[in-house]
Image (spheres, rainbow, N blue to C red):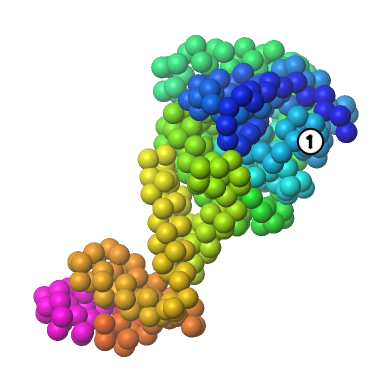
Amino acid sequence: MTSLLSYTLHDGGSGPLLVLSHALGMDREAWAPLRAQVGPQARILAFDHPGHGGSPPLQGPGSMDALVEAAAALLREVAREPVVWVGISMGAMVGMGLAIRHPSLLRGLVVAHSAAHYPDAGRALWDARIATVRREGVAAIADAVMGRYFHADFRAARPEAVAQARATLLATSPDGYAACCEAVRDVDWRDGLPSIPCPVLVIAGARDEGTPLGMSQAIAQVVPGAELAVLPQASHIGAVEQPESFARLLRAFVRDRCMAPGTGEPAAEQADGYARGLQQRRRVLGDDWVDRSLAGRTAFNTEFQELITRHAWNDIWGRPALGDRTRRFMVLSMMLGLHAWEEFALHVRAALDGRDDSRLTPDEIKEVILMAAIYCGVPTANHAMGIAGGILKERGQA
């Protein structure tokens, strides 16, 4: 299959090739703020999806499969190497499809402000939008789309950016736009997400009403080793609203998950270390706590979170000389001795909820505290006894 998509290739830099995949009603120029932040040394392939910018529309009814196959043809013809796919909204949906259907084409995937599936109520809204565009043209929905793409504070502060996005939307052919709406309406990658083999970064906007945080969490929770970061002052087009923060997350992801240090080669071992660390972290602390922690990722703390997951949970907790039970005893003792009471309470709960081979009993936790009374002092042990006793009481185990 020969690609018919219009694209721009900047291949004079170094590192893995970044493929920028835009949102519905936008085009490759919408990435200009992010490109400015990533810098001239980045290798970038930016393209227009069918019916957008310089690319011809899909033939016949729109389908996500058609968008995915068009993108796959572009990668085989132009990229000719595994790429880091960076997609927003519809562009991220196409990226998920590539990772599921054509995994050899990707070395990394960024899923920003997107969804893997829409419930019936959401599909009905897409039906209404499609009907309006086919009947009245794209201009009839332009104001509503800008309201979803950019939050009110951004629209007030950056009217020129909103005007440019609006002009791009208005230049999109109604038939091409409606066909892509049909593809987005029918997307459903839920069954395939657990099979994605490449590193995945999910980015959400805290102020995104079109694809709220829960949709991003649903993706991150089922893709093996996926990480979730939240842009606090972004709505639906974070690469325009917060390009500095978006670029910071992207650079860290490419460096730590998609490249070996000092090389341009995929960091398979490093990515595996993160995935193993995340698995170990879930096994020791439980899915609920880890999911809440990942949901709290921001551009500011994402590198610290990656460091902890990779080094503490894989490099240390993953060492074979000591089992999880022994390490639980050690961590409880150290957190108690350091007066790190939040961490102590976290590990008490995790120890009580541990799997059969690593669970600690209330009596075993009591023994830790009794030892601490001798070596750390009675007041410290008394405080620990109060924390552990309160946890046991709330669980009906006191």
Residue, disc 1: 76
Q: Residue at x 55, y 42 (%)?
A: 263
Quadrant housing residue 347: bottom left
Above or below 312: residue 61: above
Q: Residue at x 53, y 63 (%)?
A: 276
Instruction: Tell me where the magenta segment starts and ends, as one range.
Output: 369-391
Q: Amino acid at mark 1?
A: Arg
Q: Quadrant location of the C terminus?
A: bottom left
Q: Residue at x 80, y 31 (%)?
A: 77
Above or below 15: residue 334: below
Quadrant housing residue 181: top right
**Label 1 crowd (10 A; few <14 / some 14-19 / many >=20):** some
Q: Residue at x 58, y 17 (%)?
A: 165
Task: Decide which of 390, 296 is in the foreground and name it.
Answer: 296
Query: Can residue 371 be found in the magenta stretch?
Result: yes
| Image x and y of residue 102, in percent | 76, 46
* Disc 1 element: helix
